[in-house]
Image (cartoon, helix red, strand yellow):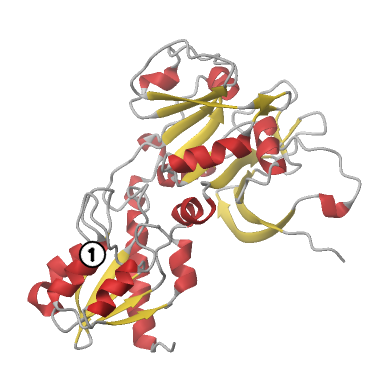
């Protein structure tokens, strides 16, 4: 299917709009929409938060009567089901839109082509696949939950040049710069949930929240900060409910060995029991459970043990390293606890996707690359 340069221009604008919802839409996907008539944009919008109007509805409201006979560009297939809002596909039909250009189909089983069918049954011309790769990049968490039944996992590490996360005595504040720590707040703000351990919570008395004072609020389009869900691995239920973690409103998930019973009740806390062995909690068992709880993505902040466990289980989708220009020595703590390999191909191989300068530090982003046999 061929698309014109103008088609690409309008869809690129829809993708730009969709990205504005990245701090607030979870568990829904980021979606943008543009309505064009006679070569002019007459309406545009993006999905802001779950339960609120979808992108197409905002665009139709802005376009008003000019939507009749127009072309709608949308980054994700219009929904076809009744939830907290009505079907966007029907809204487009009722507005008299002549043509709809869709970047990608919606993998949600509640939609999955039904939105396209509603449009086509109404005689609307539909084209699919324009800038699909860019549209998919808007929603790695939503797509992972729908297609793989697991959250998209980003593992964050703050390291020295020699790959150390703390001194031998455990001191690590601060390896990274204020600029890096501010960026961490921004990444937390975009995350649907933060994953950490009870050990980290107790050692740092951590809240694991987004701190507005450490965040460049101007980078949030409407100035709002949504606190992520906090998922804490607490195998033997060491947390008492009196830690600073629980002083911040917002949902908390405590994951524990199924042989332990919760010792306290708190309306904001959900307990999830999973299998465990001598190596720890079964993380592979946990991920589909978190996906069933509508958690799109996890931002992981923890020590070398959890980082290594996630890595060995093949659960990490993206590695984000804040690397400071300092050397801590071979006695300092390594960033990942991994087994000894006998062959190079047993080691994890990466594809660098971005390198960014943050003050004196580097922010390195990488994804796993399968090691192919020679």
User: How packed is label 1: few (under 14 Cα within 10 Å), some, or many (20 or more)?
Assistant: many
**Where does the image place residue 277, in percent across and percent down from the top left?**
70, 25
Q: Which residue is mark 1?
A: 88
Q: Quadrant of residue 15?
A: bottom left
- Secondary element at tag 1: helix
Q: Where is residue 28 shown, x and y percent of the image?
A: 35, 51
Question: Residue 340: which quarter of the image?
Answer: top right
Residue at the farthest front position: 121
Q: In terms of depth relative to the viewer, which is nearer, 252 or 288?
A: 288
Task: Return the residue nearer the eye: 184 or 214.
Answer: 184
Residue depicted at 20% across the width and 54% down the height: 85
Front residue (pair 104, 301): 104
Residue 45 appears in the rendering: no
Left or right of 309, for residue 248:
left
| Residue 369 percent location from the top left of the image | 70, 59
Q: Residue at x 57, y 56 (%)?
A: 356
Q: Quadrant of residue 242?
A: top left
- Find residue 239 and report its horizontal and vertical position in percent: 51, 15
Q: Looking at the figure, which quarter contains the C terminus?
A: bottom right
Relative placement, left or right, of 357 versus 222 is right
What residue is at 32 percent from the left and 47 percent from the top?
A: 24
Give above or below for 173 relative to 239: below
Q: Is 185 positioned to the left or the right of 330 in the image?
A: left
């Amino acid at each position: 299917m061929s698309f014109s340069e103008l088609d690409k221009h309008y869809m690129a604008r829809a993708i730009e709009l969709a990205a504005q919802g990245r701090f607030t839409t979870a568990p829904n996907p980021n979606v943008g929409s543009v309505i064009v008539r006679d070569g002019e944009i007459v309406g545009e919008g993006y999905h802001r938060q779950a339960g609120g109007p979808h992108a197409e509805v905002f665009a139709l409201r802005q376009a008003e009567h000019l939507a009749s006979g127009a072309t709608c560009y949308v980054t994700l297939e219009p929904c076809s089901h009744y939830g907290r809002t009505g079907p966007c596909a029907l809204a487009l039909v009722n507005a008299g839109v002549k043509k709809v250009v869709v970047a990608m189909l919606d993998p949600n089983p509640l939609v999955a082509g039904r939105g396209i069918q509603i449009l086509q049954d109404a005689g609307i011309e539909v084209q699919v696949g324009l800038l699909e790769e860019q549209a998919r990049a808007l929603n790695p968490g939503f797509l992972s939950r729908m297609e793989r039944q697991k959250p998209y996992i980003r593992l964050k590490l703050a390291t020295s040049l020699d790959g150390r996360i703390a001194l031998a005595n455990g001191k690590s504040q601060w390896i990274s710069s204020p600029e890096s720590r501010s960026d961490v707040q921004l990444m937390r703000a975009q995350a649907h949930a933060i994953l950490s351990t009870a050990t980290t919570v107790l050692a740092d008395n951590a809240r694991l929240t987004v701190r507005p004072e450490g965040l460049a609020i101007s980078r949030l389009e409407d100035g709002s900060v949504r606190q992520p869900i906090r998922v804490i691995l607490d195998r033997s239920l060491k947390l008492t409910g009196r830690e600073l973690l629980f002083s911040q409103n917002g949902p908390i998930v405590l994951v524990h060995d199924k042989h332990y019973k919760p010792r306290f009740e708190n309306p904001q806390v959900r307990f999830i029991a999973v299998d465990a062995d001598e190596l720890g909690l079964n993380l592979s068992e946990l991920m589909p459970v978190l996906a069933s709880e509508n958690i799109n993505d996890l931002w992981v902040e923890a020590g070398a043990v959890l980082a290594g466990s996630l890595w060995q289980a093949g659960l990490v989708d993206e590695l984000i390293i804040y690397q400071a220009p300092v050397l801590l020595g071979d006695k300092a703590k390594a960033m990942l606890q991994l087994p000894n390999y006998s062959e190079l191909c047993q080691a994890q191989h990466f594809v660098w996707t971005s390198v960014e300068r943050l003050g004196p530090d580097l922010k390195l982003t990488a994804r796993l690359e399968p090691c192919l046999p020679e």
